Image: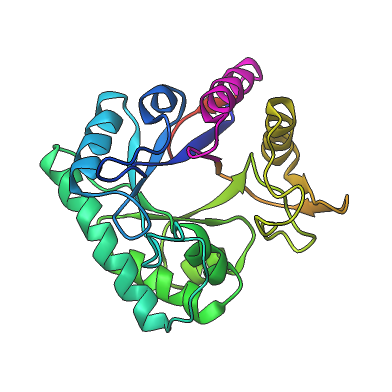
Amino acid sequence: MTMTIDINCDMGESYGAWKMGADAEVMPHISSANIAAGFHAGDPATIRKTVRLAVDNGVAIGAHPSLPDIMGFGRRAMRITPQELYDLVVYQAGAVEGFARAAGTKLHHVKCHGALYNMAANDEPLSDAMARAVKDLGGGVILYGLASSIMMDCARKHGVPAVGEGFADRGYMDDGTLAPRGQPGAMIEEEAKSVAQALAMVEQGTVTSLSGKRVAVEVGTLCLHGDQPGAVAFARALRKTLLEKGISVVAP
């Protein structure tokens, strides 16, 4: 049986006159796009253009909801209730879904952004609210969540299709969560190291934490961050290496 893996990337994170990322250059190398919905980045025109770019490249369309934090790019934690998380996800996913429908396609998945994602990965009530929100969107929308985390447990509980996510360009803690961005090693900036970490997750089901511990992870999708300077080279190298290993790159 042919092994497959999805490569996803956070995209559409420009807004107004401010530009972020190299979406047009990265898009041909990935299989699913997480499109910002306006709360940490993005605006209506950017959502529309990014959806069109994804459709033209045969890339699955996902919503990338965030905490309401434009100034902090959605990376500052806020104290919110599970109901507030539910509302944030449904509201923002609805915006991306509307543009997807207008482009003749549909919403494929939801992947939360930044602090919202990390908060839910460590908080069962928040993860539960996230799973309920994705379920209520209907249409078989998939939840992308941190591999082997409580997110996956909550998705299963609610019968929500879910895919465990591994990060090719982020450092890990011993418990399988992502290292805080301010910590040394939190971002992987070497192409070869990023590709090696991704391959280990796909082929061996493990990732090595910053302390050297091998942590079990079950991944169905690999994330690359479109806002880092090496995103295009990372995406190109990762896809090339996977294909050379006989691993097909397709959306789940």
| Left or right of 203 in this view: 230 | left
Give x and y (percent) for residue 191: 68, 27
User: In this view of the protein, which residue sits in the foreground, 118 or 153?
Assistant: 118
Q: Which of the 4 quarters of the picture holds residue 130?
A: bottom left
Please give the name of the residue rendered at 73% of the width and 25% of the height, measured from the top-left corner: 192
Please give the name of the residue rendered at 77% of the width and 51% of the height, measured from the top-left corner: 184
User: In the rendered view, how is the structure colored?
Assistant: rainbow
Q: Which of the 4 quarters of the picture holds residue 30?
A: top left
Q: Identify the magenta region.
A: 224-246
Residue 43 visible in the displayed image: yes
The total number of labels drawn is 0
User: In this view of the protein, which residue sits in the foreground, 199 or 140?
Assistant: 199
Give x and y (percent) for residue 186: 70, 50
Please give the name of the residue rendered at 82% of the width and 51% of the height, measured from the top-left corner: 210
In magenta segment, residue 107? no
Give x and y (percent) for residue 197: 72, 37
User: In this view of the protein, which residue sits in the foreground, 221 or 228?
Assistant: 228
Give x and y (percent) for residue 2: 57, 26
What's the magenta bit mostly, secondary-structure-wise?
A: helix
Q: Is residue 167 above or below residue 249?
A: below
Q: Is residue 104 above or below residue 219?
A: above
Please give the name of the residue rendered at 49% of the width and 72% of the height, measured from the top-left corner: 127
Q: Quadrant of the N terminus?
A: top right
Q: Is residue 199 above or below residue 35?
A: above
Q: Quadrant of the C terminus?
A: top left
